[in-house]
Amino acid sequence: MNIEEKLNHFKNEVGKVIIGQEKVVELIFVSLLQKGHILFESVPGTGKTMLSKAVAQAIGGTFKRIQFTPDVLPSDITGLNIYNPKTQEFELRTGPVNTDILLADEINRATPRTQSALLEVMEEKQVTIDGERIPVEEPFIVLATQNPIESKQGTFDLPEAQLDRFLMKINLGYPSRAEEKMMLNLHGTNNALNDVLPVFSKDEIVELQYKLSEMEVNDTTLDYILDLIHNSRNHEHIEVGVSPRGTIALMQAAKGIALIHNRNYVTPDDIKYVAPYVLGHRLVLNIEGITVTDASALVSDIINSSDVPVEYGVARDGV
């Protein structure tokens, strides 16, 4: 069974719990291969926790969840040394970051100091406790959620530097009427999460992560990436365009798309497919831009105004 067939099996297993989110599941898998992190934005109750748990089960991994509130401390995330009076020694109690899939729920309700503690483990794959650096095991990704703009009372906006650490940002909408009816039938009888079976082992995930280094990106495709990035920096409605970290993230995410389609090379179609999820949260709009449009519309404008190399065919459906 090749990776594309296994990914379809993976989607089917996660689909036992979450209806109608096949593309989201695919993007989570790509982020997992890239050791990247995802920021979800949606109203409460759209299944983000169940989705995260199902993904963890489908890779035979562990899952932990942090419910962020303003009183959550950095040590609640990283762990701390606790004195044991019986042994008269300090013992390390690792925090919830010691997992494979970490759901950081309502991350923008935490204080900036606590957000910074999570930032270290996201960027460096390690935590520092009393000066000691402790690596987290692979695979490890953070699936974070934040309240939408309309529900930001009592929250702390994520700074641009932290947003830039997320490989992708995905907006989860409501299911369709038909999908919601299927959901009612699915969850009316038993706990569907118990039926989710492992498809990939953690060792297979790590092996696929190494395979990404073998993916080819030719000069034509690199130039197309740079066209998109530099158009973002020169757009009339954008104050701050995509950073160099974002440039790399776009290429890396496209490599993941190519890999799951059993190719060892990246095409501009792969770039177009992931660009809306990789670039949007990295744009800072100017005053005029905020007034007349939003980041997702600007990404579409940037893509539509950038010429696709003629040597490649028509983009895939959904691009």
Image (tube, grey):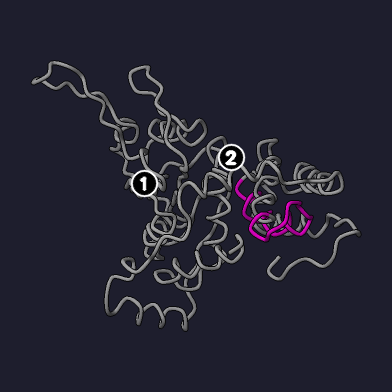
Amino acid type, mark 2: Asp
Rendering coords of residue 256 (x, y %): 64, 52
Residue 271 on the magenta span: yes
Taking 309 as reference, is 138 left or right? left
Q: Look at mark 1 in the image and give the residue it sits on.
A: 154
Rendering coords of residue 208 (x, y %): 58, 48
Quarter of the C terminus within the rendering: bottom right
Above or below residue 39? Residue 260 is below
Res. 56 image quadrant = bottom left
Looking at the picture, tell me which residue is in the foreground, 50 or 204.
204
Rendering coords of residue 270 (x, y %): 72, 57
Mark 1–mark 2 contact, CB under 8 Å? no
Amino acid type, mark 1: Gly
The secondary structure type at the circle numbered 2 is loop
Q: Which of marks 1 and 2 is nearer the N terminus?
A: 1
Q: Please identify the dominant SS of the magenta region.
A: helix
Res. 286 image quadrant = top right
Looking at the picture, tell me which residue is in the foreground, 170 or 223.
223
Q: Report the magenta residues as a range.
A: 259-281
Above or below residue 313? Residue 147 is above
- In this view, the residue farthest toward the left is 86
Taking 247 as reference, is 74 left or right? left
Q: Nearer the viewer, mark 1 or mark 2?
A: 2
Rendering coords of residue 206 (x, y %): 52, 44
Which class describes the residues within 10 Å of circle 1: few (<14), some (14-19), or many (20+)?
few
What is the spatial separation of the Cα atoms under label 1 and label 2, in whole angstroms? 23 Å
State whether residue 235 appears in this view. no
State whether residue 224 appears in this view. yes
At x 86%, y 60%, the residue is: 312
Q: Look at mark 2 in the image and give the residue it sits on.
A: 164
Looking at the picture, tell me which residue is in the foreground, 316 or 154.
316
